[in-house]
Image: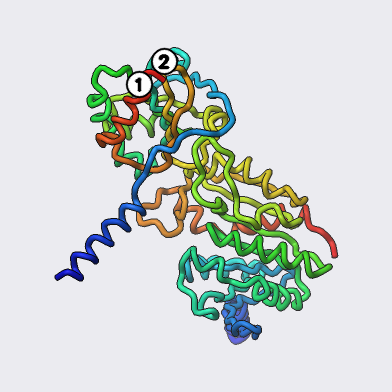
Amino acid sequence: MINRKILFMALLVFSGQLFATELKPFTADIKTPALVLQDLQGKTHNLDDYKGKIVLLQFWATYCGPCRKEMPSMNIMMKKMGDTPFKILAVNMGESKQEVEKFVSEVKPAFTILMDKEGKSIADWRVFAVPSNFIIGPKGKIRYTLFGGVEWNSDELIAKLKELSDK
Amino acid sequence: MHFKIIFIAFYLSFMATAIQAQEIKTIETDDADVEVRVFPAEGNRLLLGFPIEEGKSLTEEKTARSLAEDGVEVWMPDVLSALMLPNLKSSLKDIPAKLLIRIIKEAKKSGKDVYLIATGHDAEVVLRGASEWERLNKSSLAGAVLMFPRLFKGVPEPGEIPEYVDSVGKTKLPIMLLEGGRTPARWGVKTLSHALQENGSPVVAKIIPDIRGKFFKRDDSNRSEEVVASQMAGLIKVSLFYLNRNKVND
């Protein structure tokens, strides 16, 4: 019985190490790249216009399984951020409007979807895998990055993001 | 007259079978005896493939047969079985370079132009083998086809220039790089091409529209993926054509 308990604990610790996805403080020596893209309705969004807010900038694709899985948690995250000024910008990586609209009708993201057919922002932001995430502080500086799917509505993540309010 | 027609038909069908026949050749090395599936052909090109992570598949055999019919001899050494290693990415690092060199040397004995080919993480083995071959030998290999190569060292962190495995940028071998249009890796093709060119390799990169990663083993293939999977031999032949233009003569 004790052996089983030990085994269970060991598995728990081991699986935690394997699957824990954490925000990584951003230390690369680059200025925050510009980002000016249109959403699905043709409205232009400029990252600069969101200064004063914490921004989750995500690069995603319809063929990315983890992207599909995590987007509902991003909807909940928006609610859980409460009064904290917060914006999600999700940049689709080079797919057609038709493909993205089909995905949106199925997954129903409640946040802004941006289109980048030519991939300019993908190069500027040095994105080489999906989903790739950047957390930008209210002053426009990249504070954290995160690669891979994650439950964005976790209390731990929300608390960490809220800490950025004055940074 | 009828006899003549029957004889010619029989002769042609025999020849077609002979061309497509797969032989097993054994290469003895210090580390292990490696069995090689050989799809013989009369032409002057030999394609040496290292199917490792994905193991053996019907698609690759069909492709090899089709290439052999068109005069490209194909060799597929079963390196993992020889070393008693599992079909895993982690096995790649356990394949000694001297084993790869021994296999390449045997292929070169054919007198044909030897091209290397690999997909996914197996591309690391091809690059390691090629750079080690260049270090030890004066004669050149004709080129390498890297199909959907996955050569990141660890996870590519957002916002950072990715780090590649050590064998990237160590060879002068002409390289043809193929990537699917519906993979995140397509956005890294330019960066990877630059890294591969570091020691002088001429690199030609092509994006194949609508194709996802590992499309040849997907249950939910789209039409483009089905067509490309069925025409893989044609894709490889086009790649060899481009590599031939950059071939280094011995």
- Are the residues flagged by discs 1 and 2 from a single subunit? yes
Q: Position of residue B247 (x, y in %)?
A: 78, 57
Inspect this view and state whether residue B75 appears: yes
Return the residue nearer the eye: A79 or B24: A79
Are the two marked residues, 1 and 2, in contact with CB atoms closer than 8 angstroms? yes
Q: Given the image, what chain letter belongs to the residue carrying mark 2?
A: A
Q: Which residue corresponds to mark 2?
A: A50
In which image quadrant can residue B188 be found? top right
Horizontally, residue A116 falls left or right of residue B246, namely left
Q: Residue at x 58, y 83 (%)?
A: B24
* Location of residue B97 in the rendering, given as x and y in whole percent from the top left corner: 66, 70
On screen, residue A161 versus residue A72, left or right, reads: right
Residue displayed at 63% across by 41% down = B191
Secondary structure of the residue carrying tag 1 is strand
Q: Amino acid at mark 2?
A: Tyr
Rendered location of residue B223, percent (x, y): 42, 48
**Looking at the image, is mark 1 or mark 2 earlier in the sequence?**
2
Relative depth, front residue between B80 and B232: B80
Q: Classify residue B180 as left or right of residue B241.
A: left
- Secondary element at tag 2: helix
Judging by the rendered image, the residue that carries numbered circle 1 is A87
Q: How many marks?
A: 2
Q: Residues within 10 Å of mark 1 (few under 14, many from 20)?
A: some
Instruction: Give residue B244's quadrant in the image.
Output: bottom right
> Most extreme residue toward the left, as rendered?
A1
Q: Residue furthest front?
A: A2
